[in-house]
Amino acid sequence: MNRPVLSVKDLAITYHSASGPVPAVRGVTFDLAAGDSLGLAGESGCGKSTLANALLRLLPDGTITSGQVMIDGRDLFALSPGGLRAVRWTTGAIVFQGALHALNPVQTAGKQVREPMLIHQTVGSEDEARVRSRQLFERVGLPANQLDAYPHQLSGGQRQRVLIAMALACDPRLLIADEPTTALDLMVQAQVLALIAELRRESSLSLIFITHDLSVLTYVADRLAIMYAGKIVESGPSLSVFENATHPYTRALAAAFPTIGDQTSRLAPSGLAGDPPTPGALPAGCPFHPRCPLAEDRCQTAEPVLRKAGQAHRAACVLV
Amino acid sequence: MSSIVSLRDVHVHFGASRAVDGVSVDVKPGEVLALVGESGSGKTTLIRAVQGLQPVTAGEIIYTSAAGATAGPGRGNRGVQMIFQDPTGALNPRQTIYEIVAEGLRIRKESQNEVERVGRALSRAGLRPPERFFPMYPHQISGGQRQRVVIAGAMVMEPDLLLADEPVASLDASIRGEILALMLELVGDTGLSILVVTHDLGLAWNIADRVAVMYLGRIVELGPTEQILGEPRHPYTRALLSVVPETTRMEQQILVGEIPDSRRVPVACRFHPRCPLLQSGMLPAEVASRCTTEDPGPVDRNAGSAAACWAVT
Ligand SMILES: Nc1ncnc2c1ncn2[C@@H]1O[C@H](COP(=O)(O)OP(=O)(O)OP(=O)(O)O)[C@@H](O)[C@H]1O
Ligand SMILES: Nc1ncnc2c1ncn2[C@@H]1O[C@H](COP(=O)(O)OP(=O)(O)OP(=O)(O)O)[C@@H](O)[C@H]1O
Ligand code: SF4
Ligand code: SF4
Ligand SMILES: [Mg+2]
Ligand SMILES: [Mg+2]
């Protein structure tokens, strides 16, 4: 295995809110090797974006973090403000969830792509930034004339490409993409996924791809991590997790996306009753037990830890 | 053939924009018909027209349902009810669940047995016992329950046609299945028909009897779900299906660009500028020349299955 570009150990994140502490991420551990891709999935509120933002220390003031994040060999939480600035964009860059609607409306797409290069001085001059932004547009499949377009003149798919170009501006080793295709329709989603796959083939870019749509991940990610209530409850090679899901929650999530042509799901939609728990008020024991079809008495007492469930495949359930 | 509603060459234009451009299809009693297609293909405009919220520019929408036959289209048609994508936006935060569900009855001044009817609609939507939900407000229930309240608000009118625009797109994956199962259950229990609009072909596989594929204001392929999703014939349907992440068995045909602008519908076959089959050069010359000179026309609403394509025989 290559040296990990990212090594996360026991990461826990607790937000501060008016109604008390919100333990959004409760102990997450994983490594990401250079050039590898990890897909993160799970229901709304399970902590995906919190985890993603924490990887570049982009959390609101007052948030309590514990554990360790090594990014490209450096201890993230020990970095000085200057060191942190050097890590953001050049080591790791993020495409934020919902950013499609957050591009600056009064700046051209080209200017927004040039800005990080100039701020981080990865280019020597404005001219060099122009050359590089043109190359980036070509790389993400946008015609050069759209450098001068304003966000409202671009379609959703084109705006997503601009955001990806922006994230790639300083040539990061790690790209974190938080729900980059959720607002796009099927064909445009396929275009963006193909673009990301191509970027990864061309360079040794590592990728963290977040979505609630498990089926998308089997396409872009080598490995999957399924989160529930702030923890990874199952992880392993993508196909292994999608097709041989071990954790009852992963199984329910996978079944929610039927395979077209599979007779067992024809006229038989499959769901999961109940709602995800609130971070401040988790049920005792396995946090999934109130919704779990296989729950037993012992599930209500101790929270299960990740255990081996196959080749490089782990799950946190007493039945494993 | 009996139908709940029959669309005959329906056009809805907004100035130069031909959002719906000649749609003919029947919704049959007790069926779930899924209308699928890319963003901007005219799906929402079409069901708004069926609901009567959107005047048609040309063509006819004929309601033959028992409740709708006399009332005609428009808000007055209690036999046709609609549910929307975002349940949170659809519910008034200051009304109780009871008031929300009763609203349709009150607007129509059908106050007899109101409590009983509201209770029945809530139970039918899976919110049991209904009395527990009567005094609650939308913020006190979950996203999935909110969509159930929206469904109860439609079901209280005892419609025979339910229009649903992306009914689960804003819901979590795990809740999605529950709501879809509820829709199927309603069809089974009450004989309701559902016209559901979606991007999600998996949803169609889960609940639809028939699928209509829309491209740029027209239905380009129509037929039983198993056939449309199993052996699609129109090159657009094939491309669409090939990019569903779940269909690993097909070779991906990623179309270039986005759906063209409905203000500039291409001449002849409206799909020809993006058609992979035409671009492959494999079509016989006489077919290929028709693609760019002659409109294959809308699909036949009475055919068991149909594709608007010169290459499909
Ligand atoms: N700034 C904040 N202050 C307090 N609580 C927060 C804050 N941001 C997020 N949370 C809470 O933390 C939990 C995790 O949120 P997060 O955004 O990480 O979830 P997510 O998995 O990304 O969900 P989604 O799929 O909806 O994007 C949620 O319960 C959320 O309400
Ligand atoms: N009120 C309006 N005025 C002008 N054009 C409109 C109006 N409503 C819709 N359109 C245009 O009609 C076309 C069809 O839009 P519609 O919303 O019906 O598509 P859709 O298939 O529902 O798309 P989506 O999947 O994104 O919801 C689009 O080109 C749209 O811009
Ligand atoms: S530990 Fe128990 S409740 Fe939790 S997922 Fe496993 S079986 Fe279900
Ligand atoms: S008519 Fe021709 S251009 Fe149109 S879909 Fe068929 S093959 Fe393609
Ligand atoms: Mg998120
Ligand atoms: Mg729509």
Image (cartoon, coloured by chain):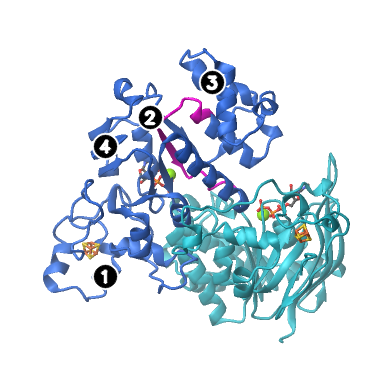
Chain colours: A cyan, B blue
Disc 1 Cβ-to-ligand 4 distance below 8 Å: yes
Label 1 vs label 3, nearer the camera: 3
Q: Earlier in the sequence, mark 2 or mark 3?
A: 2
Q: Earlier in the sequence, mark 2 or mark 4?
A: 4
Q: Mark 3 belongs to which amino acid?
A: Glu
Where does label 3 land, which residue? B103
* Image spot of residue A237 (x, y percent): 65, 76
Disc 2 from disc 3: Cα separation: 18 Å
Q: How many neighbours does mark 2 have within 10 angstroms: few (below 14), some (14-19), or many (20 or more)?
A: some
In the rendered structure, are the residues bearing label 1 and label 3 in contact, judged by CB atoms less than 8 Å apart?
no
Q: Is B239 on the left or on the right of B184, as rendered?
A: left
Query: Badge 1 is on which residue?
Result: B277
Query: Amino acid under label 4?
Result: Ser
Q: Residue furthest left?
A: B286
Reading the image, the residue beneath label 2 is B53
Q: CA distance from mark 3 to mark 4?
A: 31 Å
Circle 1 packing at 10 Å, graded few (<14), some (14-19), many (20+), is: some
Q: Which residues, given as a range, are shown in magenta?
A: B153-171
Q: Nearer the viewer, residue B188 or B159?
A: B188
Which quarter of the picture shows residue A209? bottom right
Image coords of residue B228 (percent x, y): 34, 59
Foreground mark, 2 or 3? 3
Report which residue position mark 4 lands on.
B2
- Residue at mark 2 shares a chain with residue at mark 4: yes
From the image, state whether disc 2 or disc 4 is nearer to you: 4
Question: Callout 3: residue from which chain?
Answer: B
Labels 2, 3: one chain? yes
Q: CA distance from mark 1 to mark 2?
A: 38 Å
